[in-house]
Image (tube, helix red, strand yellow):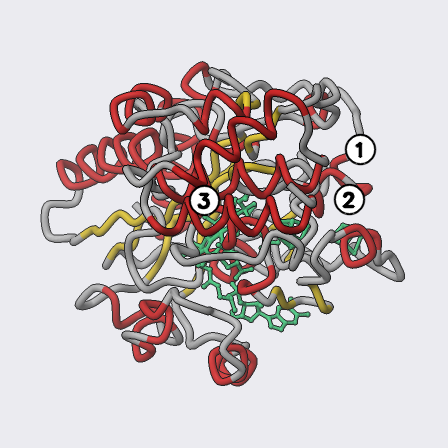
Amino acid sequence: MTASDTTRQILDSAVSRHDFALAGIASLEPSDYSDAFRDWLARGKHGEMGYLANNLDVRLDPANLLEGAKSAVVVADLYATRADNTDEPLGAGEGRIARYARGRDYHTVIKKRLHALADGLAEEFPEASFRACVDTAPVLERELAMRAGLGWTGKHTLTIHPREGSYFLLGVLFTSLELEPNPAPETDHCGTCNRCIEACPTDAITPYSVDATRCLSYLTIEHRGPIEPDAYDFAGWIYGCDICQEVCPHNSERATGATVPPAYEPRRDRFDLLEVLGWTEENRREAFTTSAMKRATLAMMKRNALILLGQAGIEGEALERVRAVAADEAEPELVRATAREVLSLGGG
Ligand code: B12
Ligand code: SF4
Ligand code: SF4
């Protein structure tokens, strides 16, 4: 079998047998953006995500991830379609969840099928080696996706497929098999558009770069410490943020015929903020079960809820509840301090 036959067989199997929406092959060459990545780190745009500065020899040269690696099979699962680009408006006292986190945990959903793909290939090519990654290895997944022809890197830094938009998650299978790489990366269709940059509520985006320390996705999910309640406009988001994707013309509402795997069926798209404020650890676990919402601790969720309550203007029952939290010695200091700050800003 030629490299070209094997490639076609793998890509067919990824799509028709393992149900990935997109699949392509990337060659393993050093990153074209090493200087930009190092500069991003040097400016501290990774914040507390110190792991991004580790293993640069692999991150910036993916061939080093697996001994003898020759190619990467890059796959994608849609977690929402373009028809899902408009949400029901938020009610008073509600906080929105980013689309990728509304269904089951994508790490598990993608990895299981990537392993199944690898197992099938290992039977056919017993000499070959494989390694599957979904966020879990020091890899610039979006650059590989771009090389594999899955889309271009938008100014908001996410990969956009020309027909399906950007609501998809990536997985990569590294292999020692010599496959036929996609001939050329998808071309950039951002043009003169700047909608994501203008719409970002925290001014986190400059073209092709996101300052993670300002991004709501980082602030609500990754940042464990205090956040001044009036420092950033949370724009109603309690877990992650989709604004730069919602405004992108390549996600504009349109039926493309694509469907989302049942695993990503949204379990919920919002939380009631006062409910979150009353959560126990048990309640948080129950609300997060099987979802990708694992990274935010109970104290972080309460911090986020308090900031959103403060930004909406607290009164009535909410004001009483925030006062009670500020006085509750059983609450962690992060939560009590946020409650105190929210009260001082709201004149409570
Ligand atoms: C750390 C991280 C974050 C951080 C930092 C985000 C960021 N923009 O870097 C935070 C917590 C903020 C975050 C947020 C989100 N994330 Co995230 N995240 C990651 C992770 C683990 C690493 C990304 C990374 O290395 N960042 C560092 C930056 C510098 O890397 P980079 O942007 O890829 O850098 C390249 C380009 O900037 C390029 N470059 C520089 N200049 C130029 C110029 C041009 C013209 C071009 C083309 C390229 C270019 O050079 C760099 C090196 O290749 C990846 C998984 C992975 N291992 O890749 C998921 C990942 C990127 N995240 C993902 C998602 C879904 C999100 C959110 C949408 C979640 C949400 N709804 O809240 C948001 C989107 C925010 C945004 N606009 O980026 C998906 C993206 C899928 C897609 N379609 O692109 C990924 C790939 C996870 C996955 N397995 O699917 N994320
Ligand atoms: S996810 Fe939200 S906060 Fe982060 S860059 Fe996009 S619009 Fe800005
Ligand atoms: S909103 Fe405009 S600039 Fe931003 S990623 Fe989409 S097309 Fe590109």
- Marks 2 and 3, how far apart in space? 19 Å
Name which quarter of the figure residue 263 lies in. top left
* Residue 206 as seen in the image, left or right of residue 67: right
Instruction: Give the vertical position of 314 relative to 72 (above or below).
Output: above
- Marks 1 and 2, how far apart in space? 7 Å
Residue at 78 percent of width and 58 percent of height: 197
Instruction: Give the vertical position of 260 relative to 197 (above or below).
Output: above
Residue at 30 percent of width and 19 percent of height: 286
* Residue 315 as seen in the image, left or right of residue 320: right
**Who is closer to the viewer here, 142 or 12?**
142
Decide if ligand 1 comes within 8 Å of the CB at mark 3.
yes
**Who is closer to the viewer here, 249 or 100?**
100
Count the marks.
3
Residue 84: horizontal and vertical position, in percent? Answer: 68, 22
In the picture of the structure, the residue carrying the numbered disc 1 is 252
* Residue 92 as seen in the image, left or right of residue 34: right
In the picture of the structure, the residue carrying the numbered disc 3 is 170
In the picture of the structure, the residue carrying the numbered disc 2 is 248
- Toward the left, the furthest residue is 126
Q: Amino acid at mark 1?
A: Ser
Neighbours of disc 2 within 10 Å: few (<14), some (14-19), many (20+): many
Give the numbered dot on residue 311. none
Name which quarter of the figure residue 253 lies in. top right
Q: Nearer the viewer, mark 2 or mark 3?
A: 2
Query: For the residue labelled by badge 1, is the local secondary structure a helix, a strand or a loop?
Result: loop
